[in-house]
Image (cartoon, coloured by chain):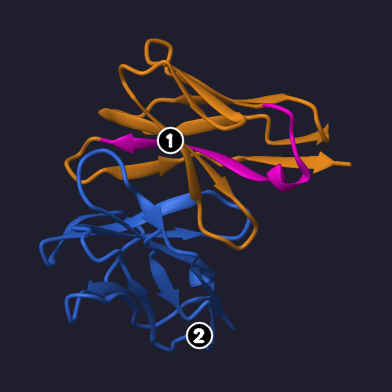
Amino acid sequence: EPEVTQTPSHQVTQMGQEVILRCVPISNHLYFYWYRQILGQKVEFLVSFYNNEISEKSEIFDDQFSVERPDGSNFTLKIRSTKLEDSAMYFCASISGGTKGYTFGSGTRLTVV
Amino acid sequence: KNQVEQSPQSLIILEGKNCTLQCNYTVSPFSNLRWYKQDTGRGPVSLTIMTFSENTKSNGRYTATLDADTKQSSLHITASQLSDSASYICVVSQNTGFQKLVFGTGTRLLVSP
């Protein structure tokens, strides 16, 4: 069964450093998403991406965040200057379209120290 | 405000017993309602998806119900197994054109031998 692949599985970074989280969505999917889950809290929407541009973003997704699909297969989330409160699990997801078929990756655990 | 609330917050049952988890939502515009299973440190895995017109959907020992009038859903687990221990998350998809998901806080289920 096709999977959404995320790397790395765990990233530790110092406050103020830039991090790039990587995702390889399912190949024929058209819509891509990033969600995050702070430990003990619910999963929160960050951003959706379609046709090489951001289609919707939450208030969490401020100027420190950016997304890119640099080569037609990878989908990246960049945090320019990490803060302690950015520590969370970050999930990538993709769908082919329509109302179904939402597939999540296994997540990247980001720890900012 | 778009919200998804779940109860109970946590639940312990004996192996082999049944249980029912509850979900109430105020998400609009509504597209579909999903139940996900999330193991600790892993991405959510879809169990069921129901659109507005569907009242019941089964997936093995999991049966979900949806009452779109009262905006309530339930997930019934039959003959529980130790491997059912996980968080069960009710998720409502907003029909904003890009299928943004609104997550509940989840019910943490522990099945004990």
Query: Residue B82 in magenta?
Result: yes
Q: Chain of mark 2?
A: A
Chain assigned orange: B
Residue B26, picture quadrant: top left
Secondary structure at numbered mark 1: strand
- For residue B34, which numbered disc appears in the image? 1
Of residues B20 and B98, the one drawn nearer to the viewer in this rendering: B20
Across and down, in percent, residue B105 comes to 56, 42
Give the residues in magenta: B78-94
Query: Residue B47 in magenta?
Result: no
Secondary structure at numbered mark 2: loop
Give the side of residue B64 with respect to residue B99, left or right.
right
Q: Amino acid at mark 1?
A: Arg
Residue A112, picture quadrant: bottom right
Q: Colour of chain A?
A: blue
Residue B9, picture quadrant: top right
Across and down, in percent, residue B74 comes to 55, 23
> Which of the two discs, 2 and 1, sits closer to the camera?
1
Give the side of residue B91 with respect to residue A76, left or right.
right
Q: Quadrant of the N terminus of chain A?
A: bottom left
Residue A26 is at least partly visible in this image: yes
Tell me whether marks 2 and 1 sit on the same chain.
no
Q: Is residue A113 above or below residue B83?
A: below
Q: Is residue A93 above or below residue A13?
A: above
For label 2, the residue is A15
Across and down, in percent, residue B81 comes to 75, 40
Q: Residue, x 48% and y 77% (percent of image)?
A: A83
Q: Chain of mark 1?
A: B
Q: Quadrant of the C terminus of chain A?
A: bottom right
